[in-house]
Image (cartoon, rainbow, N blue to C red):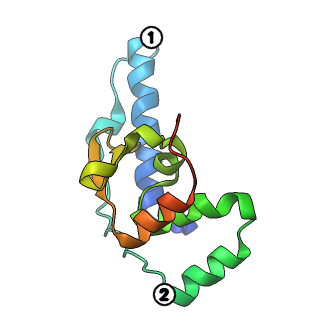
Amino acid sequence: MRLEQGVSYRTVNIDLTTLHFMYTKAIEWNYAVRNPVDQIRKLKVDPRPMEILTIEDEKRLLDECAEYTKPIVQMALYTGMRKGEVLDLKWSEVKWEIKKIRVRGTKVRKIRFVPINGTLLQFLTSLGPKTGD
């Protein structure tokens, strides 16, 4: 029925996950005895294609940014980090000696390291003193 309304497979899967969680809680709280969503398979969703910005796209994006947001956007562009990862970043996570940034994953809650290339090194150095977080 939801597909007939024009929603995507991804949206249907989100709905199923929500319903599954609701029934799980209903069972836990003795409002239901079984979870009917257990019998429903999620729809196969093709992964979204990765969008790659051109140099011109990046320049346009940065030109449109407010001055105080530029470093955040630049950091995301240079590293591929997620918004939450960039916003949670602290100077202590920048490992200058091995030219890597330690990232505590917001999505998979795993620690990974992002390499610091020449452009990123120059950018980080331009941001100012590295005291405190």
Q: Residues within 10 Å of mark 2 (few under 14, many from 20)?
A: few
Q: Is residue 41 above or below residue 44?
A: above
* C-beta proximity under 8 Å, tags 2 and 1: no
Residue at 27 percent of width and 41 percent of height:
39
- In the image shown, does 90 or 50 lie closer to the viewer? 90
Where residue 78 appears, as percent x and y from the top left, is 44, 68
In the rendered image of this protein, does residue 60 appear above or below residue 132? Answer: below
> In which quadrant of the rendered view does residue 106 lie?
top left
Secondary structure beneath label 2: loop
The three-letter amino acid code for the residue at tag 1 is Trp
Q: Amino acid at mark 2?
A: Thr
Residue 29, label in figure: 1
| Disc 1 crowd, CA 10 A, few/some/many (<14, 14-19, 20+) | few
Direction from residue 121 to residue 112 in the image, left or right = left
Residue 73 as seen in the image, left or right of residue 92: right
* Closer-to-camera residue (74/81): 74
Q: Is residue 102 visible?
A: yes
Please tell me which residue is depicted at 57% across the width and 84% down the height of the picture.
57
Residue where numbered disc 2 is placed: 54
What number is the disc on residue 43?
none
Q: Residue at x 58, y 63 (%)?
A: 73
Residue 77 spot, x, y in % from top left: 48, 68
Residue 2 appears in view: no
Q: Position of residue 48 (x, y in %)?
A: 38, 71
Q: Residue furthest left?
A: 98
